[in-house]
Amino acid sequence: MANSFFTSVKGFFFLLLVLLLPIDHADACSRVVMATDSARIVMVGRTLDWRTPIPTNIYLYPQGITKQSMPSGPSLHWTSRYASILAVSYDGGVTEGMNEAGLVMNGLFCNASRYPAPVEGDTSTPVMSLSILVSFFLDNFANVSQVDDWLANHHFVIPSSNFDNGTSTLLHWALTDISGDNLIIEYVDGRLTSYRGKNLTILTNNPIFSDMQAINAYWNDVGGVNMLPGTVRSADRFVRGAFFISHVPHDLDHHNAFASLSTIMANLSVPWLYQVEGKPHLSSTQWRSIADLTEGRYYFRLADSLSEFYIEFKGEILSPGSTIKKLNRSNIDSYQLVGRANSRLTPTHSFTPIW
């Protein structure tokens, strides 16, 4: 009994310490994985929350596209093995995407991240631009195991990058494949830290993932049936997402699995135009997505739209030599986007990365 008491007290004071830290400077995003018991249905939901508009277009890239991680200097060069559907922000950087093999990757803001920086005079270590990093993994790998193995044997550095009038681009990433396996990638103090497992179904923002797991463990002891943390802070969204995804049924058909994940993502969203006085960094959800790895569909819903639309691989020519296509949202009223939207894709050149 005494040990249980002191463990509870220790957990409480750890939680209190974390809550007092300035961890909510990162604007909000949330990611949740739904995998049914049979592992025949795997979907990844995500919210994109930010204080200013982030124009996001959807691209469909075929196989066989030649790319590079930086325009000059030591860099990685590759030709895409897999077709991909990408969400590209500012028409200059890949926020997230999924490939035809059943691998999805999402980048979420995390201002605790510290990347390995390029070293002056180093002509051998490849430099990877954040604008193209997600594409590199989706172009080259079919599953989490391949990504994990590659990271264990290769090293690259990441240059500093800014957006939105000087905001540092600080991210961590999560990948999920068609088997339901997950990989979380963080850079802490310049060193790669990764976590892998089918149980790693939640990611939000700050603090780093190991600290977030400790916070969630505290709330697991509290129990969520009668009380859950309800603010828009990253840690609160993590706890709510973890509770709900572990307490909804997982013996579901496709329709109900999608509905369950969709409503969980709505619960983790920040209300449209919501503001916290004195805390402009807590931001509205601008859009939500669901990558349906089972059906090869990428669903996208704008906060100010009445419905969602999706792009799918089915029916598209994805082989080398095929045309890159783009759904340019600036040319389409959001109210016109509903259901299958492949007909809205138009031929285009590759986007120009914000190096």
Image: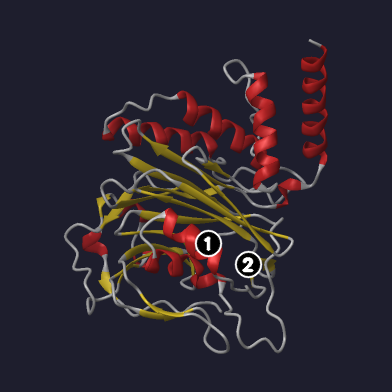
- Badge 1 density bin: few <14, some 14–19, many ≥20, Cα 10 Å: some
Q: Earlier in the sequence, mark 2 or mark 1?
A: 1
Residue 47, percent from left and from top: 50, 47
Q: Outermost residue toward the left?
A: 315
Q: CA distance from mark 2 to mark 1?
A: 9 Å
Judge whether 62 appears above or below 25 on screen.
below
The secondary element bearing badge 1 is classed as loop
Report the residue marked by disc 2.
164
Judge whether 333 appears above or below 288 on screen.
below
**Residue at the image point whose x is 47% and y is 34% from the top:** 264
Report if the CB atoms under discs 2 and 1 are less than 8 Å apart: yes
Residue 116, percent from left and from top: 68, 70
Report the residue marked by disc 1.
54
**Residue at the image point whose x is 18% and y is 68% from the top:** 317
- Judge left or right: residue 85 versus residue 77: left
Residue 267, percent from left and from top: 51, 33
Residue 162, percent from left and from top: 65, 71
- Judge left or right: residue 121 versus residue 38: right
